[in-house]
Amino acid sequence: MCVTMAASGPRETTASCPPTARLHREVPPLSAYAVKHIAHDHGPLASMMRDVRRGPFSFTSNEPEASEAALGNDIYVIEVRGEAKGPRSFWLGYKYRAYEKYPPAGNGLWRERFKYKNTGRPGERGEGFYFDVPIVLTDPLVSGWLRDRPPGMALMPDEFVAGIEALASDPANGAKRFG
């Protein structure tokens, strides 16, 4: 049994697969996305962590990013705080692996402003980590990149992911696994 691509989509055939189709499946690399949570507009991220711990989620209106993220990619939710007399600061709240993208029922919006909600797998423990209190991102390159992005979801450069993951793996920061 072999699955082939037809103009109408994937199709199973009784023909045997060519040997290269069985041996050399291309697996696309995982991507990471940043979602800005604007504290001034949506309240502090810590106030919604009770709901996030039960099942991580994020909201955005950015497409195709919302669809691409839902293909098993990581989403980092970053709180943006506007200081009274200083520059914005960025705080890592949680990271989860997204598998679903939902539009709201009808033609409405999530929380009266977002077109899509990304989540993990329904009914399963979330994959990723969270902080009870978000931790500040101090890397000036990451902060500069976030500052230059409009609100919403954006594909993160690969070189930033390792640094953010290092924050989560440092026991002093208190990252906790979902579940």
Image: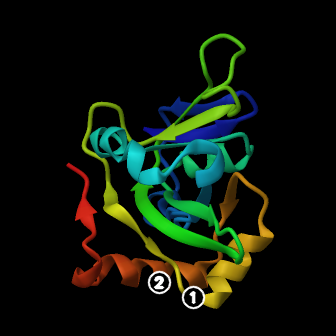
Give the residue drawn at x 69%, y 71%: 146
Q: Report x, y in % for residue 160.
A: 57, 81
Q: Quadrant of residue 48?
A: top left
Q: Which is closer to the viewer, label 2 or label 1? A: 1
- Crowd tier of the residue under label 1, counting other residues whose Cα lies within 10 Å: few below 14, some 14–19, many 20 or above: few
Tell me which label, 2 or 1, sits earlier in the chain. Answer: 1
Q: Is residue 136 above or below residue 138?
A: above
Q: Which residue is mark 2?
A: 162
Between the C-alphas of marks 2 and 1, the distance is 12 Å
Q: Report x, y in % for residue 105.
A: 60, 14
Q: Residue 139, which numbered label?
A: 1
Q: Give the secondary structure at mark 2.
A: helix
The N terminus: image quadrant: top left
Which amino acid, by three-letter code, is at mark 2? Answer: Ala
Q: Give the secondary structure at mark 1.
A: loop
Q: Report x, y in % for residue 65.
A: 69, 50
Give the residue drawn at x 61%, y 62%: 80
Of residues 118 and 26, the one nearer the viewer is: 118
Q: Please, which residue is most extreme toward the bottom here?
A: 140
Give the residue drawn at x 50%, y 57%: 73
Q: Is residue 175 left or right of residue 40?
A: left
- Crowd tier of the residue under label 2, counting other residues whose Cα lies within 10 Å: few below 14, some 14–19, many 20 or above: few
Q: Residue 17, which numbered label?
A: none
